[in-house]
Image (tube, grey):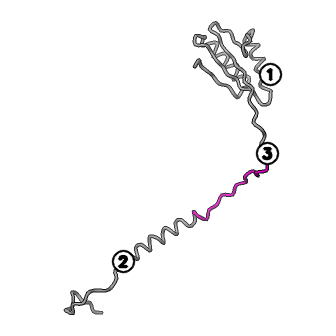
């Protein structure tokens, strides 16, 4: 095994290709192929509904508006409620309806907090799931 250092005096140019960068690029491409191949073959099987299945028509929810006046009067869709006991009975009747109606609680700006808190507690205790508080926008 001999090695020639320098030109050797013949003056010929070196025509051998440097293969080190080519091998590095090929190894990087091979590693990328190995890493991405399992990801490309992975599939998630989903049971999607058939396009011929008719979806039920959307049903507009029934909305009950509870307005709380400045003096503590509770209004059920504009009709005054005699007391919190009667309000609870109304809410128990509405709870069993299908679909359950939405209850929108709209307190006046000057309504007392304890009345609003009692109405919220009664609404929650009766099992009304769809409840919201609306302000005076």
User: What element does badge 2 sit on?
Assistant: helix
Residue count near mark 3 (Cα–Cα under 10 Å), binned few <14, some 14–19, many ≥20: few
Q: Tell me which corner region of the image, top left, top right, bottom left or bottom right, holds residue 131.
A: top right
> Mark 1 or mark 3, which has the lower sequence index?
3
Marks 1 and 3, Cα distance to the nearest angstrom? 32 Å
- Image location (x, y in percent) of residue 11: 21, 90
Residue in the image at 56% along x and 67% along y: 37
Magenta segment's dominant SS is loop
- Image location (x, y in percent) of residue 135: 59, 19
Residue topped by disc 1 = 93
Residue topped by disc 2 = 20
Residue count near mark 2 (Cα–Cα under 10 Å), binned few <14, some 14–19, many ≥20: few
Residue topped by disc 3 = 54
- Image vertical order of residue 94 relative to residue 67, above or below: below
- Image location (x, y in percent) of residue 64: 72, 21
Which quarter of the rendered picture does the N terminus lie within? bottom left
- Image vertical order of residue 135 relative to residue 55, above or below: above
Q: Which range of residues does the magenta coloring cover?
A: 39-53
């Amino acid at each position: 095994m001999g090695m020639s250092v320098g030109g050797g005096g013949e003056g010929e140019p070196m025509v051998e290709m440097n293969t080190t960068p080519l091998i590095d690029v090929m190894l990087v491409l091979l590693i990328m192929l190995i890493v991405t191949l399992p990801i490309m073959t992975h599939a998630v099987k989903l049971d999607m509904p058939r396009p011929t299945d008719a979806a039920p028509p959307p049903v507009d929810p029934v909305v009950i508006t509870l307005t709380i006046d400045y003096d503590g009067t509770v209004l059920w869709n504009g009709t005054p409620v005699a007391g919190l006991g009667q309000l609870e009975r109304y809410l128990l009747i509405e709870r069993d309806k299908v679909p359950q109606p939405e209850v929108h609680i709209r307190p006046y700006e000057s309504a007392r907090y304890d009345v609003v808190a009692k109405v919220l507690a009664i609404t929650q205790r009766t099992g009304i799931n769809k409840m919201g508080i609306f302000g005076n926008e």
